[in-house]
Image: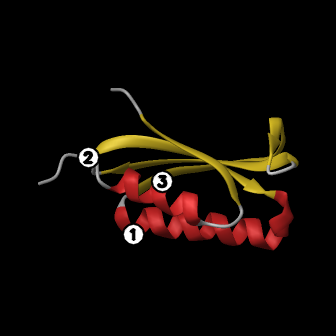
Amino acid sequence: MAVKANYETVMIFSLKQGEEGIQALIEKFKALIEKHATLQNVDEWGKRRLAYLINKESDGYYVLMNFESTAEFPAELDRIFKITDGVLRSMIIKKGE
């Protein structure tokens, strides 16, 4: 049996997506995580000012998700973040014991 660990990911979505677009992205990533891992928590922080401009945008929509998965899944999730339109930034962290 594969060893599982706890991870958290923070995603910043572009506000250019509109409310429906942002909710669609959240649902997409929730479904993806639920398919390959155990989703523990979804915390929508909402619209926040960015520390610096990203793609000429000064605000973004922040979402935090906690999940438990094997070590291979976070790399695939990160790859999908990078190729998805509307994701300004993302970060996946393995949580300590």
Q: How is the image coloured?
A: secondary structure
**Residue to which mark 1 is pinned:** 35
Query: Which of the 4 image quarters holds residue 39?
Result: bottom left
Q: Amino acid at mark 3?
A: Asp
- The residue drawn where x is 16% and y is 52% is 2
CA–CA distance in space, label 2 to label 1: 15 Å
At numbered mark 3, what does the secondary structure look like: helix, strand or loop? helix
User: Which disc number belongs to residue 78?
Assistant: 3
Q: Is residue 22 left or right of residue 27?
A: right
Residue 89, given in percent of the width and then of the height, sits at 65, 48
Residue 77, given in percent of the width and then of the height, sits at 45, 58
CA–CA distance in space, label 3 to label 1: 15 Å
- The residue drawn where x is 38% and y is 52% is 75
Give neighbour class at mark 2: few <14, some 14-19, many 20+ (Cα, 10 Å): some
Q: Amino acid at mark 1?
A: Lys
**Residue to which mark 2 is pinned:** 4
CA–CA distance in space, label 3 to label 2: 17 Å
Q: Amino acid at mark 2?
A: Lys
- The residue drawn where x is 27% and y is 51% is 70
Query: Which of labels 3 and 1 is toward the front?
Result: 3
Query: Which of labels 3 and 2 is toward the front?
Result: 3
Query: Which of the 4 image quarters holds residue 49?
Result: top right
N-terminal-most mark, 2 or 1 = 2
At numbered mark 2, what does the secondary structure look like: helix, strand or loop? loop
Give yes or no for contact between labels 3 and 1 (Cβ–Cβ under 8 Å): no
Quarter of the figure that contains the N terminus: bottom left
Is 41 in front, or is 16? 16
N-terminal-most mark, 3 or 2 = 2
